Amino acid sequence: MEKIRFIGGLFALFSVVLGAFASHFFKKLIDESSLQSFEVGIRYLMFHGLALILLSIIPIEGKKVIFRLFTWGSILFSFSIFFLSLQSLIKINLKWLGPITPLGGTLLIIGWIIFTINSLK
């Protein structure tokens, strides 16, 4: 339980820190479209950080699987968006990360399906 709560807290922390960077620093350095994408990654990281914190305290079957799906889904989804949004800044072509984003999203969807089904038990 502590591990789930810890990762959830880290995701929430990262989203706040990255949100501050986005609104105060990156806003001046990347185009509006990239900034909007970056903010999507921040939102999903925060949502799933909070979801992990809640997961750590509710009794639900399949907690370990849901934890892994939310964790890896968030990492693949949000961090691929972060890197893709900042590729003009870091001057590296990261277009190959494009297919990683939907893979992360798929893991999140599967996690929510399992969560929802197991909530009915």
Image (tube, rainbow, N blue to C red):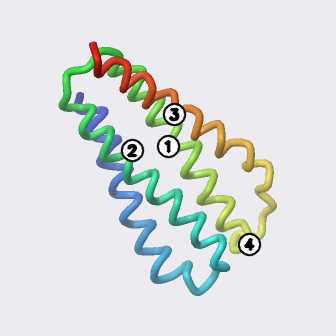
How much space separates mark 2 and mark 4, taking CA atoms? 27 Å
> In the image, what residue occupies the spot 36% across and 26% down?
116
Residue extending farthest to the bottom is 28
List x then y, in percent, for residue 36. Answer: 57, 69
**CA separation in Å, label 4 and label 1:** 23 Å
Q: Nearer the viewer, mark 4 or mark 3?
A: 3
Give the position of the C terminus as an image quadrant. Answer: top left
Q: Of the residues shown, which amino acid type is indicated by label 2?
A: His
Q: Residue at x 46, y 74 (%)?
A: 21
Q: Secondary structure at mark 2?
A: helix
Element marked by disc 4: helix
Residue 114's image quarter?
A: top left
Q: Which residue is mark 3?
A: 109
Foreground pick, 94 / 105 = 105
**Label 1 – label 3 distance at C-alpha:** 11 Å
Type of amino acid under label 1 = Ser
**Image x and y of residue 27, in percent:** 55, 82
**Mark 3 belongs to which amino acid?**
Ile
Q: Which residue is mark 4?
A: 88
Q: Residue at x 32, y 38 (%)?
A: 52
Left or right of 23 on screen, residue 102: right
Q: Are marks 2 and 1 in contact (CB under 8 Å)?
A: yes
Q: Compared with residue 95, is residue 66 higher up or lower down, i.e. above or below?
A: above
Mark 2 or mark 4, earlier in chain: 2
Give the SS element for disc 1: helix
Residue pointed to by mark 1:
74
